[in-house]
Image (cartoon, rainbow, N blue to C red):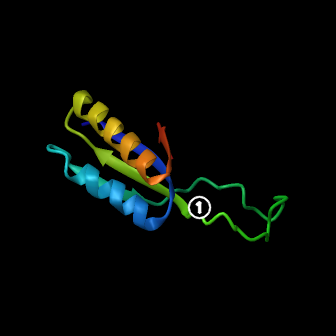
Amino acid sequence: MPVLRVRLTGSETDANAVMSVVHGIEGIERVEEVADLMPHMDDDDSSSAGLVDDLGSGGVHAVEIETPDRRSSEQVREVISRSAEALGMAVEFVEEF
């Protein structure tokens, strides 16, 4: 069973909206936000350490989606891309988190 891994950058509300749309696709087995263990360049040595994030961009949401086959995976990719664009989110499809 193929597993898509997606990083969504935006608000929690927008990430939940995208995940809800994916849940509505027939045959989708699982849509789950998982812990993203990748550091996001906010360590103590970073030049932006301690600065305020005034962009209000929200956070990074790591989402795993189980699909029944490759065709469904492509459909999910299309739906996520369109939904994220409509909400002003950044989306990245990755092999692993």
How far across and how far down the image is residue 11, in percent? 49, 64
Up-down: is 95 above or below 46? above
Q: Residue at x 49, y 51 (%)?
A: 89
How far across and how far down the image is residue 78, in percent? 34, 36
Up-down: is 51 above or below 2? below
Residue 95 left/right relative to 52: left
Up-down: is 95 above or below 40? above
Residue lying farthest to the left in this orientation: 26
Between 54 and 6, the one lying in front of the other is 54
Amino acid, disc 1: Ser
Residue 6 left/right relative to 70: right
Q: Quadrant of residue 4?
A: top left
Residue 73 left/right relative to 34: left
Q: Residue at x 65, y 55 (%)?
A: 40
Residue lying farthest to the top in this orientation: 71
Q: Residue at x 48, y 39 (%)?
A: 94
How far across and how far down the image is residue 57, in percent? 59, 61
Q: Residue at x 19, y 37 (%)?
A: 68
Q: How many marks?
A: 1
Q: Secondary structure at mark 1?
A: loop
Question: Which residue is the site of mark 1?
Answer: 57
Residue 83 left/right relative to 50: left
Q: Quadrant of residue 74?
A: top left
How far across and how far down the image is residue 79, in percent? 31, 41
Between 1 and 87, the one lying in front of the other is 87
- Quarter of the rendering occupied by the N terminus: top left
How many other residues sit within 10 Å of disc 1, few (<14), some (14-19) or many (≥20)?
few
